[in-house]
Image (cartoon, rainbow, N blue to C red):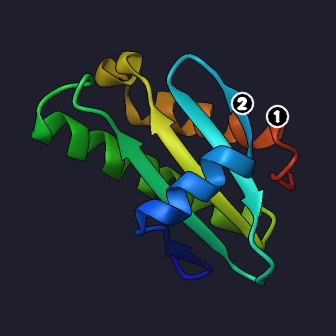
């Protein structure tokens, strides 16, 4: 992720949850909040409800790779939190990629 950084602190996640806009689809939920910088920060959350650690980490990698390959399409200056839903457990890479771009389009943060 050359243009982006990661959200790591719980306080950053909570600020995006509280003040950001959210949209959802079948596999993912996306919260977006402007961060007053020129780069994006992305945080990925996968609950224990989704599965064991192997499955959760797999989904995290799918979301991160989908974002990495398309990060030049996203507007800059945003904090983005992506939450995986339980239905993402059986999703393929293509499903996750399509869901991420769909949510970016709904948030009007993807330039096509």
> Separation of disc 1 and disc 2 at Cα?
7 Å
Residue 64 in the image: above or below residue 94: below
Tag nearer the camera, 1 or 2:
2
Disc assigned to residue 71 = none
Q: What SS does tag 1 mark?
A: helix
Residue 24 in the image: above or below residue 106: above
| Cβ atoms under marks 1 and 2 closer than 8 Å | yes
Mark 1 = which residue?
106
Q: Look at 12% across and 40% down and name the residue there.
A: 53
Q: Look at 82% across and 52% down and name the residue there.
A: 109
Q: Residues within 10 Å of mark 1 (few under 14, many from 20)?
A: some
Residue 31 in the image: above or below residue 51: below
* Residue 64 position within the rendered picture, expressed as x and y whole percent measured from the top left: 43, 56
Q: Look at 39% across and 24% down and name the residue there.
A: 88
* Residue 99 position within the rendered picture, expressed as x and y whole percent measured from the top left: 60, 31
Q: In the visual, does 50 lie left or right of 79?
A: left
Q: Look at 48% across and 67% down and name the residue there.
A: 7
Disc assigned to residue 23 = 2
Q: What SS does tag 2 mark?
A: strand
């Amino acid at each position: 992720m050359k243009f982006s950084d990661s959200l790591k602190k719980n306080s950053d996640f909570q600020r995006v949850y509280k003040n950001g806009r959210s949209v959802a689809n079948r596999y993912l939920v996306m919260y977006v909040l402007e961060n007053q910088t020129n780069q994006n920060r992305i945080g990925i959350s996968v609950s224990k409800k989704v599965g064991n650690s192997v499955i959760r980490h797999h989904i995290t990698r799918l979301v991160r790779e989908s974002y990495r390959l398309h990060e030049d399409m996203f507007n800059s200056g945003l904090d983005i939190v992506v939450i995986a839903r339980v239905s993402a457990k059986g999703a393929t890479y293509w499903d996750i990629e399509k869901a991420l771009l769909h949510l970016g389009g709904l948030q009007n943060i993807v330039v096509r």
